[in-house]
Image (cartoon, grey):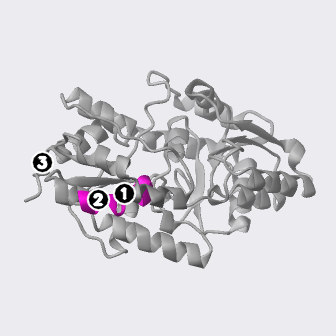
Amino acid sequence: DRQLVAALHRRGHTVDVYSVPWRNYARHLADNVDRRWLARLAAAPVDLWLQDELNHPSLVFVNRRLRAATRAPIVAIVHHLRCSEEHPAPLLRLYRRVERAYLATVDALLANSRTTLATVEALGIERPAHVAWPAADHLEPAATIDPASIAARALLGGPLRILFVGNVIPRKGLHLLIDALARTDAAWELSVVGQTAVDPGYARRVAAQARTLGLLPRIRFLDRLDDAALADAYRSHHLLAVPSYEGFGIAYLEAQRFGLPVIALTSGAAREAIIDGQTGFLVSPGDAAAIARHIAHLDGDRTALAGMGMSARLGYKLHPTWAASMAGAAHWLESIPPRQ
């Protein structure tokens, strides 16, 4: 969202940001009966509404009133549908119903991947749409890594250095990765970059899982890193493994920028960022054995690791930059007419 706002500013547009604090789902739904929230939005002098779809529970009924009060079109920025995640069946039915109702109130869709757009269309929602892929040139824009450095890193002796980047929450699949690591005799070290405070209960369960399996001494929990430290982490590791469902997965692209192959899932949009067998490996959800096989292969064949790392770096270079992707999105937004 920040990259799009910056692109709109560069094109001479004024962007006012209306924020809501992060709360539980029920509290967000209650925003729809908050008269101050509705009055604030209804009085806003806007030509176009850009709404992050993650805020859908705060807007599902508000949008109906906005549509009655203004001709400004409503565009949903869709990163990832909540109803695409794993939840208990009753909650999943609720999320799907609310998300579908929200998406029915918008005039157009700006998605971060073709996969994300397809998940919206699978709910029966068809609107004018544009796909604007995220990029990874926000990390040290001037930094480069050449093929010789990628090869030297891969061929240097020592354990395979594996990186996990993402909040320590169930959807990100750290438990699956730890299960896979317990299944391989490969020499490895794992660094986990991501906040453990988002779901402390899950973080404790994952640590207990690693302890029970005797793996905890080989795992470092680094919490969240700033961009410079994150770039250093990518540069010093061999492989990124994040077996999660992603609406796109910026970490996959960030890793490839630094010549790291990626292990991800066949579900979600990872296939739009990773070429299976060339820039990484795509495994079926829950398939810890496949993850273990790929880790053992890359540890045992460092020449293959180097070649895959070089392919990953090339794949990143062929991907659009933030400037190019957001310029296309901004141009498309400018073409959306007022509602009649």
- Mark nearest the camera among 3 and 2 is 2
Mark 3 or mark 1: whose residue is earlier in sequence = 1
Position of the N terminus by quadrant: top left
Residue 25 percent coordinates (x, y): 53, 60
Q: Which structural element holds mark 1?
A: helix
Q: Exactly how many numbered labels are in the figure?
A: 3
The residue pinned by badge 3 equals 335
Please, what is the three-letter code of the amino acid marked with disc 2?
Asn
Q: Which residues are magenta?
A: 53-65
> Circle 3 — which element?
loop
Disc 2 crowd rating (10 Å Cα; few below 14, some 14-19, many 20+) is many
Identify which residue is drawn at 36% across, 52% down. Answer: 35
Residue 230 numbered mark, or none: none
Check residue 63 in the rendering and tell me which mark sits there, or answer none. 2
Determine which quarter of the picture holds residue 136: top left
Quadrant in which the C terminus appears: bottom left
Q: Residues within 10 Å of mark 3 (few under 14, many from 20)?
A: few
Q: For the residues labelled 1 and 2, say whether their Cβ atoms are less than 8 Å apart.
A: yes
Residue 272 shows up from this direction: no
Residue topped by disc 1 = 59
The mark that comes first in sequence, 3 or 2, is 2
| Residue type highlighted by circle 3 | Ser
Residue at 65% across, 35% down:
224
Spatial CA distance of label 3 from label 1 is 24 Å
Which of the pair 258/269 is nearer the observer? 269
